[in-house]
Image (cartoon, rainbow, N blue to C red):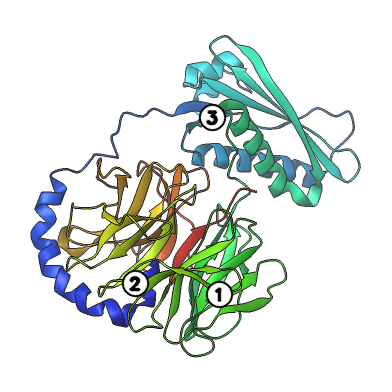
Amino acid sequence: MRTVSILLTITLTFTISSAALAQQDDDAVRKILFDTISGEYQPTPIGVDEMKYIGNQYITHDDSVLMYYVTRIVQDDIDFYADFELIPLDSFFLRTYEISEMSVLGWRRLGADILVKLEAEFPGDKMRVRWRLFDTVRQQQFARGMVEKQKGNWRVMGHEISNDIVHTLTGEDGIFLTKIVYAREVKDGKELFVADYDGANEKQLTFTGSINISPSFSPTKDEVYFTSYMRGDPQLFKVNINTLEIVQIANFPGIVAAPAVSPDGDKIACVLSKDGNSEIYVLDTKGRVIKRLTRHSAIDTAPSWSPDGRLIAFSSDRTGLPQIYLMDSDGLNVRRLTFQGSYNDSPIWSSRADRITFVSRTKHGRFDLASIDTSGYDYRILTELGMNENPHFSPDGKHIVFSSSRLGPQDIFTMDITGRNQRRLTRSGKCSNPDWGPIK
């Protein structure tokens, strides 16, 4: 959990005291679980054919490898996307019918409703890929496009093709060129790293030798705000992901933790303890206090903005154990959102504005990810393996990135909002606090 990790000392008391009650309440929680694994939603089945060369000159071995790699990227992207299901090429089908390549009708027989055909040319030191979409039922082409890049940008090319396909089929922007930032233990500290949405191109952002946690992308996606212990008490900093320049934003007595940048990028909600208790404040981007939002003897923490910036979700133990609350962005109209389960923390607002995902202590005291409608109904448990923490939505609101210990050392994972398609993003272990960057 993003904020609990920061406020470990503060929260330890109610964490321990809540364990017994959480266990006691667990059976009641489980009775209202929504079976997200066998939900009724059916993704569109799509086949992606192997890329063909359509030029009239000899190509090199490296060019053939590029065609293979770009095809793999498009297939992986389509397979990842929540609305789609990748239909794999069946070599047994080819052998049975004694054919060397699949026709549109053949893909239909494999179960694909839509077929993606890719064709490559190599003008100079560039690669040009033409993509076409076919309706396999009608066996007709209904869309096409072209992407051209320097050969060295083959990964970007593959993701751009996938983004074009998503936009053509759904009208929405694809997420395949987005970034994910996270913290990883390095020696005795924690440093920030950033990687492509699929885990490729990992890059270390901080080299402070200190503890750097709770990264939060700015809407411009070039800057990441975070909490760091590099100068003693946890304070607020930001790092430019291109230049790696680090600037201190805020410095108050006590802690400055759990930053959440507002959707317009002009404000930062965060937790300050400068007056002796953990309260939620809103700062400007220079670190100056705009307004104190909460005023309660309990621990108020983990703020998360609604997509329109009008509301803030947060967690508080004002009823004795942490639960999720909502308030207007000026701190008024505070109301409790979660009543299921005795321990709910680290809320994050869906970019679609309709749901809030959070960490819930469930069976055997395990931390699972849960989701609830913003009206307080439709409570669902999304995970059932290991300890799962630090949820954050993708910018299209269809995926969730989180940290989990399900395979041993804590790593970063992703899944669809239904709980399907859970994937491991990092494999080094000791990774936490992911945040999914914006599309543009």
Q: Name the quadrant of the N terminus.
A: bottom left
Residue displayed at 34% across by 64% down: 405
Q: Report, in whole angstroms, how far the alpha carbon at label 3 lies from the one at label 2.
A: 46 Å
N-terminal label among 3 and 2 = 2
The circle on residue 288 is 1
Residue type pointed to by label 1:
Arg
Q: Is residue 359 visible?
A: no
- Badge 3 marks a residue whose secondary structure is loop
Residue 242: image quadrant is bottom right
In the rendered structure, the answer to whether residue 18 lies left or right of residue 128 reads left
Residue displayed at 33% across by 45% down: 374
Q: Which residue is mark 3?
A: 89
Residue type pointed to by label 3:
Leu
Whole-percent x, y for residue 411 in the image: 43, 64
Whole-percent x, y for residue 138 in the image: 57, 9
Residue displayed at 8% across by 61% down: 24
Residue type pointed to by label 2:
Val
Between circles 3 and 1, the one closer to the viewer is 1
Q: Are marks 2 and 1 in contact (CB under 8 Å)?
A: no
Q: Which residue is mark 2?
A: 4
